[in-house]
Amino acid sequence: MTLPQILSLTVLAGMMLLFIWGRFRYDLVAIMALLAGLTVGIIKPEDAFSGFSDDIVIIVASALVLSGAVQRSGVIERAMLVLQRRVRSVQGQLLLLTSSVGFASALVKNIGALALMMPVALQTAKRAGTTPSIFLMPMAFASLLGGLITLVGTSPNIIVSRVREEMTGEPFRMFDYAPVGLGLTAVGLVFLTFGYRLLPRNRQATPTLGEALDIQSYVTEAEIPAGSPAVDETVGAFQKRHDHEVAVTMILRAGIRSAPFADTVLMPEDVLILAGAPDCLERAIVSDGLELEGQHRERPEGARDEMGVIEAVIGVDSPLVGATAGQLGLHERFGLNLIAVSRQGERLAQRLGNIVLLAGDVIVLQGPIKLLLERLGDLGCLPLAERTLRLGSVRNRLLPLAILAAAMIATASGYVPVAVAFFAAAALVVLSGALPVREAYTHVEWPILVMLGALIPVSDTLRTTGATELIGDWLSNFAATLPPWGAVALILAAAMAVTPFLNNAATVLVMAPIAATFATGLGYRPEAFLMATAVGAGCDFLTPIGHQCNTLVMGPGGYRFSDYARLGAPLSLLVLVLGTPLILWVWPV
């Protein structure tokens, strides 16, 4: 063993110990490992920052933006709501989510399937009053298992198919992976349904100041247009359809106030005073096509900037205190629309323009972004930092899904690389207005990207120092003494062990030739060993860095590096124990 090889393995071992220790945050550990590699000379200065241009960084960042756009649209969430109403237990919800992700990953790239379903998991956790960490890591693992089912599910399958074609003249076909992949996916889903209890229950994403100031009781005013699903529906049915998360506190019909009795039938042009949490109000308004008060007013002259919504607290010395929006001429004088009000300990049941505002009230104002920021000082209001409300914003519900579907089809066809397709899709959702630029940046988990960019050149030292060839020689020598099932299990275990350091595609590029070579040397057919390589490379359940699906859920789930092994180690053992005989049954040597 040469000195560079020793240094590479030492740096990687030290990095893993720091990750497990948890004293330093994961991005800082990655930076320290990068600096250590530079210091001992196993990383060249010109290669130090090559990781930040790697495809995986682009894929993860783009997937987070796309996930945010899908979440903002609310389409998948509403589609899943029908099933979620029938499934109340955490285990049932978890099985529904993991199954959806797992089998979707068989048809599209697993990172795309996970990005599509993450918003549903976040909303499910919110409805159930639990932490998203219960759902997100099992969903990531389910997406990896589902990717084993078909040729296009994950990159290792495509690479292994190419290696087999080079060796035998015949590649693996689309569904050659299905018998092994389906078996492991089914067993894995059952395990995840019960094994989620191994995860710590206190894991959650770091809350922003806005979340700490979360306010759950707003009142807003919306008109029912002709053609809305709410037309000819009773108040009771309207509230039941929205899971009683939105309450009708008053109805105005032809300017006359009336009490919202449960059997009152709603009609076009009725104005509803609605109360509820911001997200619940938004879902009701968008799904029923309701028109918010002031939403379609003309903008002030010269104010052609991007429209936005801001939440602010009325100060003691504010000119709003003791007045109504109508008396102040909020739109005429300041160019802003009042679209919601919240008052601690009180449910308001008046038209927004007639509510007498008090110090401490939380209001939601809509207007041009630049004008909003300028007018808050004039109005004596304090913005709630880092709070983003979409109430009153216009959303194209189907556009983000159409863009994501196009990206998935492009990658499945093989004509467009995953990184290019996802980056283009992320750009399109922003350019189309489906996701505002400011909101897009808030969805990107920057510490995750720093960790990836720093770790890629560190992990690559295994290849550049020749350590991978050395490991391959050790495996070949050891496998010669094993029975066929032992040799297949060794390749499967080795691929699973190497994946966290090289990522799954690189693992296949390194391991597939090794597996095929010593299979031939031992007189065996190569298919079982190539299949074991693909399964092992696709099943990184031990770390957040071996596969972008694991990385994608790390920030939103609030996971620590060591959390992955708590759930992933027994799942890895399950794949090893059941995968070996399953591979040999389908692909005898």
Image (cartoon, rainbow, N blue to C red):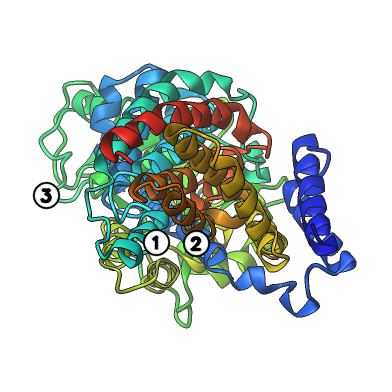
Residue at position x 36%, y 44% in the image: 528
Q: Which of pointers 3 and 1 lies earlier in the amino acid sequence?
A: 1
Give residue 566's quadrant in the image.
top right
Q: Which mark is residue 159?
A: 1
Q: Which residue is mark 2?
A: 509
Q: Residue furthest right?
A: 39
Q: Where residue 379 sits: x, y (%)? A: 64, 58
Three-letter code, disc 2? Leu
Badges 2 and 1: C-beta atoms under 8 Å apart? yes
Residue at position x 37%, y 29% in the image: 581
Residue 220 visible in the snapshot: no
Q: Where residue 132 sits: x, y (%)? A: 51, 33
Secondary element at tag 2: helix
**Spatial distance from mark 2 to mark 1, Cα to Cα?**
7 Å
Is residue 471 left or right of 273 when viewed as pictured?
right
Q: Nearer the viewer, mark 2 or mark 3?
A: 2
Q: Is residue 504 above or below residue 265?
A: below
Give residue 4's quadrant in the image.
bottom right
Q: Which mark is residue 227?
A: 3
